[in-house]
Amino acid sequence: DIVVTQSPDSLAVSLGERATINCKSSQSLLHSSNNKNYLAWYQQRPGQSPKLLIYWASIRESGVPDRFSGSGSGTDFTLTISSLQAEDVAVYYCQQYYSLSNFGQGTKVEIK
Amino acid sequence: QVTLRESGPALVKPTETLTLTCTFSGFSLSTGQMCVNWVRQPPGKPLEWLALIDWEDDKFYSLSLKTRLTISKDTSKNQVVLTLTTVGPADSGTYFCARSPTAYYHYMDAWGKGTTVTVSS
């Protein structure tokens, strides 16, 4: 079973400032057949269902603001919100889909 | 427009079997190379992937719950059904169904609003 671990568990960022969330996998998510990282990021606002932000570690889903970006390869990945907006208050999850599927434990983002 | 909607009992007794239905529209599981997943979330806890079924009727399950889960589809009704046997309080939570837009890469681009299940006598 591949385990994905996020850090930190929570963070408070001032409006307009950068937020950075990390996701570490117990095994490489880089597949040699297509050179792609099987990692996605989701946003879950309070009381709502999750929303896909990023897939293939760095591809932004259609309609997602460009202040959201994903980076990393292999076992270490990062979601960056370049300029935090009030509507970005949410819990963010990474998901590996290299082998079956698993989510990280979530990172709660709040306004400082 | 892709939509998914979960339905099922709000209250289930311990040791009973939970049956949930995902009714979807805007895509096909018979002709489109897609999948439907089930994901759950206990109150205040993280998301947990449970199972998926693809257009070719291939089924995959969470290793930790494999013995208790069954997923199936009815393409004529655009429905996917999940059953979970011998439920206990730890199975309480919100259950979501979600679409993967390809049969081979299981990120989830469309989600239902979820249905809340409480296991209690």
Image: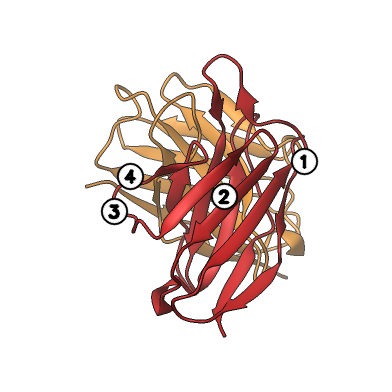
Chain colours: A red, B orange
Q: CA distance from mark 2 to mark 3?
A: 23 Å
Do discs 2 and 3 belong to a common subunit?
no
Establish if B94 lies above or below A110. Answer: above
Do discs 2 and 1 belong to a common subunit?
yes
Q: Could you tell me if the residues under marks 4 and 3 are in contact, i.e. CB atoms within 8 Å?
A: no
Q: CA distance from mark 2 to mark 1?
A: 13 Å
Q: Nearer the viewer, residue A17 or B120?
A: A17
Chain of the residue that carries numbered disc 3 in the rendered image:
A
* Tag shown at residue B39: 2
Left or right of B80 on screen, residue B40: right
* Tag shown at residue A63: 3
Residue B10: percent from left, percent from top: 54, 66
Amino acid of disc 2: Val
Q: CA distance from mark 1 to mark 3?
A: 35 Å
Q: Could you tell me if the residues under marks 4 and 2 are in contact, i.e. CB atoms within 8 Å?
A: no
Do discs 1 and 3 belong to a common subunit?
no
Which residue is outermost to the bottom?
A112
* Tag shown at residue B24: 4
Amino acid of disc 3: Gly
Residue neighbourhood size for the residue with mark 3, other residues' Cα within 10 Å, grouped as few (<14), some (14–19), many (≥20) = few
* Tag shown at residue B64: 1
Left or right of B5 on screen, residue B9: right
Residue neighbourhood size for the residue with mark 4, other residues' Cα within 10 Å, grouped as few (<14), some (14–19), many (≥20) = many
Left or right of B17 on screen, residue A65: left
The residue drawn where x is 47% and y is 48% is: B97
The residue drawn where x is 59% and y is 51% is: A78
Residue neighbourhood size for the residue with mark 2, other residues' Cα within 10 Å, grouped as few (<14), some (14–19), many (≥20) = some
